[in-house]
Structures are given as C-alpha cells and as structure tokens.
Amino acid sequence: MTEPLTTDRLALRPWQDSDVDFAYDLYSRWLVQRFIGTEPVVMASRSEAEERVRRFQDLQHPVHGIWAVTRKDDGTPVGTVLLKPIPASGEEPLQPSADIEIGWHFHPDHWGNGYASEAAGAVLSHAFASGLEKVVAVTNPANEASQSVCRRLGMEHLGTSKKYYNDQCELFVGSKPALES
Ligand SMILES: CC(C)(COP(=O)(O)OP(=O)(O)OC[C@H]1O[C@@H](n2cnc3c(N)ncnc32)[C@H](O)[C@@H]1OP(=O)(O)O)[C@@H](O)C(=O)NCCC(=O)NCCS
C-alpha cells in the first residue's frame, strides 16, 4: 500500500482508477518521456494508460510506493513520484537490485513550481523515517531539470555509471541524515 503523504502544497496518494486520463495525458507527451528509458517512447493509447495505472496500484509494499502527486488546494494531479528497487544492469529482462531508487515524472503544465522537489522531499523523508539508509536516483546525462531536483534534495552526485538499467546515467545518492544529538 502506497502510504499517503502530505507537504505544504501537495497531497501524495495511491493512484486511482479515475487517474487514467491524467496518466494518458502525462505519459503520451514526448517532453515527459524523452529522457526515460534507453529508447524513449510515448504512450500511444488509453488502454496503455489503464495498464500503467493498474501496475502503479499493484506495487504493494510497506515502504516503497508509486504516488500520484496532487495539489492540496483543488486536487489537480500534477505528477508521479516513485520509490522502488532499481533494476541492475545485466541480461534482459532486467532484475531488481537491492538498491532503492526515487524517481519523478511531472506534467509540463506544472513544471517550474518546485512541486517535483517538494513531493520527492516528502518521499525521501518517508524512506529514511521507514529505515532505508540510502536511496539512489539516475538521470539521463542531458536531463538537467532532473539533476537539479536531485541537488535540491541534497543528493550527492557520484558521477556517470552503467550500474543500472543497462544505460549510462548520472548517478545520485541520498543518505539517511545522521540524528542530531
Ligand atoms: C524533472 C522534472 C520533474 C522537474 O520538474 P520541475 O517542475 O522543473 O521541478 P522543480 O520545479 O521542483 O525544480 C527543479 C529544478 O530544475 C530546474 N529546471 C527546470 N527545468 C529545467 C531545464 N529545462 N533545464 C535546466 N534546469 C531546469 C528548475 O529551475 C529547478 O532548479 P533550481 O533548484 O535551481 O531552482 C520535470 O522536468 C519532468 O517531469 N520531466 C519529465 C520526466 C523526467 O525526465 N523525469 C526524470 C527522469 S530521471
């Protein structure tokens, strides 16, 4: 069960069947998909969106999750944040590694408001409060916006790596903050 989380402006909740139109609008855009995967493709049909929402809903874990990020003021969905095992590089089909990744996909209509950083910050806090010691993020080397989100979150840039997804990515790591005494 994806645990609901809130921030000043946002409510992060499990994906619902009623989010299919939003999922289709989000993932059918090249601007959103262009840096995702080794061979980016846009979603081509509403049935794919239904399948994606089902997959998002299927992830059942006490800590991991795939959140629909909505605005608190009017409930508008603005994006996705995920926290899940990251696939290790290797033979296809790729298998999940022991490392946990955080990722984000936001609708271009809502970029530039700090929503991605705010929502991902809440998910990172949830991850560390739930006992995870580190969380990784990978981005396409050209994806400066995503790298800015990593930096805003205080994640450390470890350089370029081919450790995950059979792809050359910029690798960032966030570590559980030491408890203040
Ligand atoms: C990555 C993404 C979530 C960032 O969304 P956003 O709304 O710009 O995020 P935020 O408002 O929280 O700010 C992110 C930072 O990126 C910067 N930024 C935004 N667009 C940028 C761009 N095209 N080039 C460089 N920097 C950019 C912002 O100025 C901000 O930087 P700051 O911390 O210096 O102020 C959004 O671009 C997106 O959903 N992209 C498509 C999906 C994707 O690529 N996901 C990541 C896969 S690794």
Image: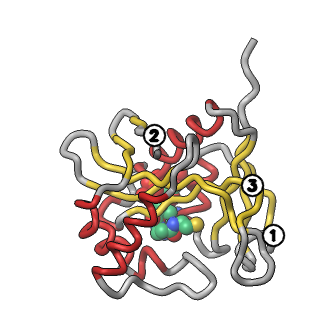
Find numbered disc 3 in the image and state the secondary structure of the residue it sits on. strand
The answer to whether residue 178 is left or right of residue 5 is right
For the residue marked with disc 3, what is the amino acid? Asp
Name the residue rendered at 56%, 59% in the picture: 103
Q: Amino acid at mark 1?
A: Lys
| 20 w.r.t. 178: above or below | below
* Closer to the camera in the image, 117 or 70: 70
Q: Is residue 89 left or right of residue 76?
A: right
Residue 149 lies, in percent from the top left, at: 56, 54
- The residues bearing labels 3 and 1 have C-alpha atoms spaced at a distance of 11 Å
Whether the residue under disc 1 has CB within 8 Å of ligand 1: no
Q: Earlier in the sequence, mark 3 or mark 1?
A: 3
Q: Could you tell me how far apart the alpha carbons at marks 2 and 1 are, in whole angstroms?
A: 29 Å
Residue under label 1, please give it: 163
The residue type indicated by label 2 comes to Glu
Residue picked out by circle 2: 3
